[in-house]
Image (spheres, helix red, strand yellow):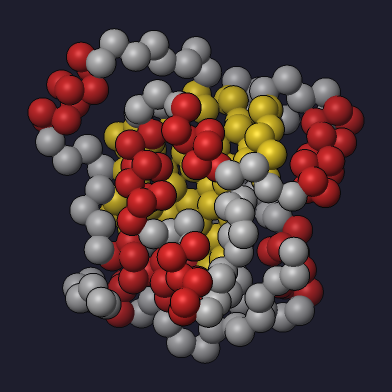
Amino acid sequence: AAANPDVGLIGCEPFLNGVVGALGHIQSGELTNVRLHMGDALEVLERLPDASLDRAFLLHPDPWPKMRHAKRRFVNPGPLDMLAAKLKPGAELRIGTDHDIYCRWTLMQMAKRHDFAWQVTGPADWNTRPADWPQTRYEAKARRLGHEVWYFRYLRLCLTAQGIAASSKNGVRQPQRNWIISITPPPTMAPIDSAAERQAPARNCSSGGRQR
C-alpha cells in the first residue's frame, strides 16, 4: 500500500487478531488506500462490480486438509467463478501456499478452468516469490520451519468479444483507482499438457499446516 499509493487495496480477514494487526500497520503508516473487511471475502466480492479488480491475492488460506472438508476450500468452482467475474480481463490472480495438499489441489482445480492461464515457464516461477508479492506471517512461519512455499500466478483471460460487449453495456461505474483484493478465507484430475505443468510441484511437498 505504501509503495503503491494510487492503488486501492481491500483486505479480507476473518480473524480479529489479524484485523487488529493490520489496523496498526495502516495507522502507523498513515495509509489512506486500504480498506479492511472482517469476515468472508465472498461477502465483499458479491458487492463489487464485475470486471472491477486488477489483481487478487489468495495468500496461505486454510488448507482444510481432510478430503471431507475439501468443499470448504476457496479454490473451488463457486468462489473461483465469482472471483473471475470480478477480475478485469488481463488481471492477475496470485495464490500462495505452503501446504502440499492445497498445492496439488490448486493445480488440479485451476487446470480445469478456461478463464485463467497459468503464468509459468519453469520451476523458478512457482519456487520464487516475486518482488511485488507481499510476504505473510504464515509464509514467514513456514520458512522458519523449513517448509517449501509455492507461488502461482494466473492471468484472467477474456474469452469472447461478446463477453466484452456485454460488460460494456452494463453501465457499471468503474472505480477511480485500480483495486486489488487480498483474501484470507474463513476457515477428477485434469490432463497435464505442457512441459512446465509436468514439472509442477506435486511431489516432495511439505506436510505442515498452520494453527489459526
User: Looking at the rendering, in which quadrant would you find the C terminus?
Assistant: bottom right
Nearer to the camera, 143 or 128: 143
Nearer to the camera, 2 or 63: 63
Vertical position of residue 179 compared to residue 127: above or below: above
Nearer to the camera, 92 or 112: 112
Residue at 47% x, 16% y: name it: 175
Count up the numbered dots. Answer: 0
Residue at 49% x, 62% y: name it: 73
- Residue 7: x %, y % from top left: 58, 25
- Residue 159: x %, y % from top left: 17, 40
- Residue 11: x %, y % from top left: 64, 38
User: Can I make out residue 50 in this image?
Assistant: yes
Nearer to the camera, 100 or 133: 100
Q: Is residue 159 left or right of residue 100?
A: left
Vertical position of residue 26 compared to residue 174: above or below: below
Residue furthest front in the image: 68
Location of residue 148 (image quadrant): bottom right
Vertical position of residue 39 compared to residue 34: above or below: below
Residue at 56% x, 71% y: name it: 64
Vertical position of residue 163 compared to residue 185: above or below: above
Location of residue 97 (image quadrant): bottom right
User: Looking at the rendering, in which quadrant would you find the N terminus?
Assistant: top right
- Residue 138: x %, y % from top left: 71, 63
Q: Is residue 152 left or right of residue 138?
A: left
Residue at 56% x, 69% y: name it: 63
User: Can I make out residue 3 in this image?
Assistant: no
